[in-house]
Image (cartoon, grey):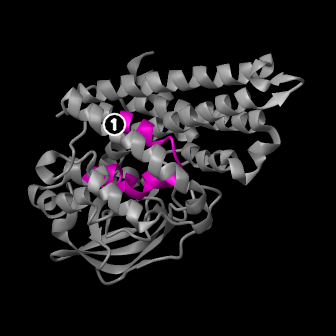
Amino acid sequence: MALDAETFDALLDHIRRFVAERLRPLEAQVEAEDAIPQDVIDEMKAMGLFGLSIAEDHGGLGLTMSEEARVAIELGRTTPAFRSAFGTNVGIGSQGLVMAGTPDQKAEWLPRIASGEVVTSFALTEPDVGSDSGAVKARAVRDGDVYRLSGTKRFITNADKADLFTVMARTGDDPGARGVSAFLVPRDLPGVSIGHPEKKMGQKGAKVADVIFDDVAVPAANRLGAEGEGFRIAMRVLDRGRLHISAVCVGVAERLIADCVAYATERKQFGKAIAEHQLIQAMIADSKTEALVARAMVLETAAAKDAGKDVVMESAAAKYFASEMVGRVADRAVQIFGGAGYIADYGIERLYRDVRLFRIYEGTSQIQQIIIARETLKRGG
């Protein structure tokens, strides 16, 4: 259920000011320390950011997809690591539970997820399993009232601080996606261990790590949906997650464009501001046009999802276009800033590195192309 317009506008304005006044001044610190200050996390919890997509009945804000997308655009105007701090609670870490959880499962976990007391994580990728997510090798074998879960998950966002994992594991002999089931796995179960956070190209402050399950006794009551439904749940979760990431891409692009305009207006070469040179104007024009297209795609698809329409293809197209778009905008931003764009002091090179990940996670650009083509052929055009 959507918030009334006045309440939502107030929320959006509060988030906009929080990003501009609180988060952006901390970007260099987060980059240097590879960590988000705890007091900022606490402020995010107090604002309700950990429960954006969780129903009000369970303590969240209960935003529609359209509202969530507009919030994500605003949050995209700063280092992506800030959004990542609560992003798994809003998206892939909680939505399997929202979509397929039993009343008891929801009552146990969702209020604590919405408040930020519990941080969630989504464990699908494995050392040998990435884009081919139906090839999951982690195995969960039924043993009375529990499943014995063993396997390793790789590059798991927020694994270092997660309290609850949504884990995809093979439960049957059926090949491919049909044999995959989903489980809620608390971090404190015996046999769960977390690897050392990886060193990454960008998005410092947002950690990824391996999660190892060594004969973990997962209560059968923690299974999400029926056996064999895990892949279907995962794909439904990713549809929403892709729209959210697309919106973040739009926000980052708009931030970069604003930074480029400010710099190009002040920087002078050949006796005039570089903003007056047509080749600089061309790069700004291309960036603005692409960002406007991505924004329109995201908001239109979000509205269609809220209306109950099938948006598998549209979500993939939005994620494909928006993530590729923001990469091009970031590249042009470095070019417009010139040598300054390559220097850390201006923050452009940081965002250039940060946005590269958007073309990989929640399905690579190539996977989005496959989905778009498949759905287009299925629909007949």
Left or right of residue 310: residue 314: right
Residue reaching furthest to the right: 270
In the rendered image, residue 73 lying in the magenta stretch gets the answer yes
Left or right of residue 338: residue 297: left
Residue 5 horizontal/vertical position (percent): 22, 27
Residue 357 horizontal/vertical position (percent): 58, 49
Left or right of residue 222: residue 176: right
Q: Residues within 10 Å of mark 1 (few under 14, many from 20)?
A: some
Q: Residue at x 41, y 79 (%)?
A: 193
Residue closest to the eye, 18 or 378: 18
Judged by its main secondary structure, the magenta piece is: helix
Q: Tell me if I can see residue 310 in this picture.
A: no
Residue closest to the eye, 345 or 359: 345
Residue 334 horizontal/vertical position (percent): 74, 39
In the picture, the quarter occupied by the N terminus is: top left
Compared with residue 261, is residue 134 higher up or lower down, i.e. above or below?
below
Q: Tell me if I can see residue 375 in this picture.
A: yes
Q: Which residues are magenta?
A: 70-96
Name the residue type under label 1: Leu
Compared with residue 252, is residue 97 higher up or lower down, i.e. above or below?
below
In the rendered image, residue 258 lying in the magenta stretch gets the answer no
Q: Quadrant of residue 242?
A: top left
Q: Quadrant of residue 325?
A: top right
In the picture, the quarter occupied by the C terminus is: top left
Q: Residue at x 46, y 63 (%)?
A: 156
Tag 1 residue? 12
Left or right of residue 113: residue 338: right
Residue closest to the eye, 46 or 83: 46
